[in-house]
């Protein structure tokens, strides 16, 4: 497959959003990582005929550094997961309504939400590390290190066959419904 390196709204910049509480959200669109290419049928067994797939990385800034496991941090992770699941479902169903296959990966399980689960889970952190080159800290679970937010980052993944410009357009149109507005 011959993909451009990365597709983002302005070369070198992800879609930058901010929520009502001031927490940032960064969204970028990429060709699939080597892991997804090598394991597509094991992760997404229903997805066999798509010539191109795009990975949408959604990074949400957390209120806390996510290196420990405390009741507050677990509550925050669940809040961010729910926020992504709501946004991701809206994005995926909007893309599906336009005739494009799309699915989001449940950050907790690593399995697709709208397709049959495969025999192996998806690893969001590993894919973000591969595509964005962010370092990872390995303790009980792997934690990303964002260049600005440190370990206060919650990664999530959506996969679609829709062209990047359509993913970007739909993302920008539905983000305000989730309390996210674009910043420059």
Image: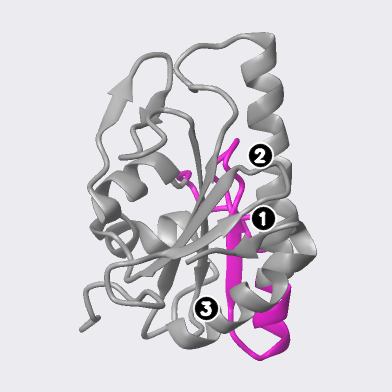
Q: Residues within 10 Å of mark 1 (few under 14, many from 20)?
A: some
User: Could you tell me how far apart the alpha carbons at marks 2 and 1 are, in whole angstroms?
Assistant: 16 Å
List x then y, in percent, for residue 124. Answer: 44, 45
Magenta residues? 92-121
Mark 2 or 1, closer to the camera: 2
Image quadrant for the N terminus? bottom left
- Please name whichever residue, 119 or 92, is drawn nearer the observer in this view of the structure: 92
Residue 14, relative to residue 11: is it above or below? above
What secondary structure is marked by label 1? Answer: loop
Residue at position x 29%, y 31% in the image: 136
Disc 3 target residue: 168
Residue 43, relative to residue 99: is it above or below? above
List x then y, in percent, for residue 147. Answer: 30, 40
Q: Are marks 1 and 3 in contact (CB under 8 Å)?
A: no
The mark that comes first in sequence, 1 or 3, is 1
List x then y, in percent, for residue 146. Answer: 35, 38
Residue 113 located within the stretch drawn in magenta? yes
What secondary structure is marked by label 3? Answer: helix
Residue at position x 54%, y 63% in the image: 183
Residue 104 located within the stretch drawn in magenta? yes
User: Could you tell me how far apart the alpha carbons at marks 1 and 3 are, in whole angstroms?
Assistant: 21 Å
Residue 94, relative to residue 125: is it above or below? below
Disc 1 target residue: 113
Disc 2 target residue: 80
Prevailing secondary structure class for the magenta stretch in the rendered image: loop
């Amino acid at each position: 497959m011959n993909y451009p390196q990365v597709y983002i709204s302005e070369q070198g910049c992800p879609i930058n959003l901010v929520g009502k509480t001031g927490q940032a959200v960064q969204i970028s669109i990429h060709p699939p990582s080597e892991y997804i290419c090598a394991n597509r049928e094991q992760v997404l067994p229903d997805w066999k005929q798509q010539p191109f797939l795009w990975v949408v990385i959604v990074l949400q800034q957390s209120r806390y550094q996510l290196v420990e496991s405390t009741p507050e941090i677990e509550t925050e992770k669940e809040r961010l997961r729910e926020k992504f699941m709501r946004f991701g479902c809206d994005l995926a169903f909007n893309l599906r309504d336009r005739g494009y296959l799309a699915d989001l990966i449940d950050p907790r399980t690593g399995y697709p939400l709208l397709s049959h689960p495969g025999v192996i889970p998806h690893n969001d952190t590993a894919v973000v590390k591969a595509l964005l080159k962010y370092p990872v800290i390995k303790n009980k679970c792997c934690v990303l290190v964002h260049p600005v937010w440190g370990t206060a980052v919650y990664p999530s993944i959506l996969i679609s066959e829709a062209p990047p410009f359509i993913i970007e357009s739909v993302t920008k149109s539905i983000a305000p419904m989730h309390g996210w507005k674009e910043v420059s």
